[in-house]
Amino acid sequence: MKVRVLKNYEELGKAAGEFSAEIIKKAIAEKGKARIVLSTGASQFETLKTLVESDVDWSKVEMFHLDEYINLPESHPASFRKYLKERFVSKVNLKAAHFVDGEGNVEETIRKLTEEIRKDEIDLGLIGIGENAHIAFNDPPADFDTREAYIVVNLDDACKRQQVREGWFPTVDDVPKQAISMSVYQIMQCKVIVSAVPHKVKANAIKLTLENDVTNTIPATMLKKHPNVNLFIDEESASLVDKKVLEQYMA
């Protein structure tokens, strides 16, 4: 894992977005196409904005997304399909976009997504880290053993509270209890992973991730086993990490 510490959220988003654009352009140059996975949430706004403004040939890019609440209509402000369509898909000319639809037949949705995502390698995964150190909706204790591509997961209280704090739902009781999530195993199949994690509210999650061995009670620690992970944090999200530990990852 390589860690870059930027001054603030804006600089972090710009750096992560520019780095990601170069990965995508490299894949297109080598293969004539690129396949990417995008995450959502308030922490990704600036990174996605930078990507949209980049000179990537999006007509050669196929996009998958990480997760979606079960039985939440796309019209709801918290829908990740709505999020990605408004902030990304409507602004670029993608070759294809594969959304996680939490409405209707969940088993069929998972079957189709699995079929599509496993047709070829994923060149880049933009994978956020939650306040409870989850990746996608794999809350602790995360399932590190399944080899399924997408799974149904139960959301823990810490995850629900984050969704309320970020303004997606009025109360914890309004947050759906379950979601469809890309599995930890499938996330780890991405050729390159970029994780943009700004803000003070993520400081403890970053501390836990960098200072602990791999454990499913801190799901993001699994990223450290990936051969090409690039973690972008700002001064606020880096603020609790032991300086010596941080230096090891920045070396």
Image (tube, helix red, strand yellow):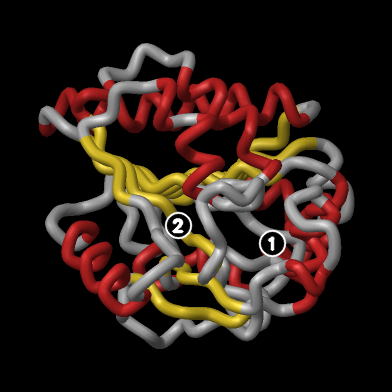
Q: Is residue 235 above or below residue 111?
A: above
Near-viewer residue (47 or 40): 40
Q: Is residue 58 left or right of residue 99?
A: left
Q: Position of residue 225 (x, y in %)?
A: 46, 66
Is 87 situated above or below 172? above
The residue closer to the viewer here, 5 or 115, is 115
Amino acid on which the number 1 mark rests in the picture:
Leu
Label 1 sits on residue: 210
Q: 115 or 245: nearer the eye?
A: 115
Picture quarter with the C terminus: top right
- Number of dots carrying numbers: 2
Where residue 105 appears, x then y in whole percent?
33, 75
Q: Which residue is mark 2?
A: 66
In the figure, is residue 125 to the left or right of 116?
right
Pointer 2 and pointer 1: residues touching (CB < 8 Å)?
no
Residue at image x 19%, y 58%?
A: 116
**For marks 2 and 1 on the same chain, the one whose residue lies earlier in the sequence:** 2
Tell me where residue 159 sits by quadrant: bottom right
How far from the left and from the top, in percent, is residue 47? 58, 30
In x, y percent, where is residue 97? 30, 42
Q: Residues within 10 Å of mark 1 (few under 14, many from 20)?
A: many
- Tell me the number on the disc at residue 9: none
Badge nearest the viewer, 2 or 1: 2
Residue drawn 63% across the image and 67% down it? 134
Q: Is residue 11 above or below residue 137?
A: above
**Label 1 secondary element:** helix
Left or right of residue 35, residue 225 in this image: right
Residue shown at the point (27%, 50%) measured from the top left: 122
> Residue 227 falls in which quadrant of the image?
bottom left
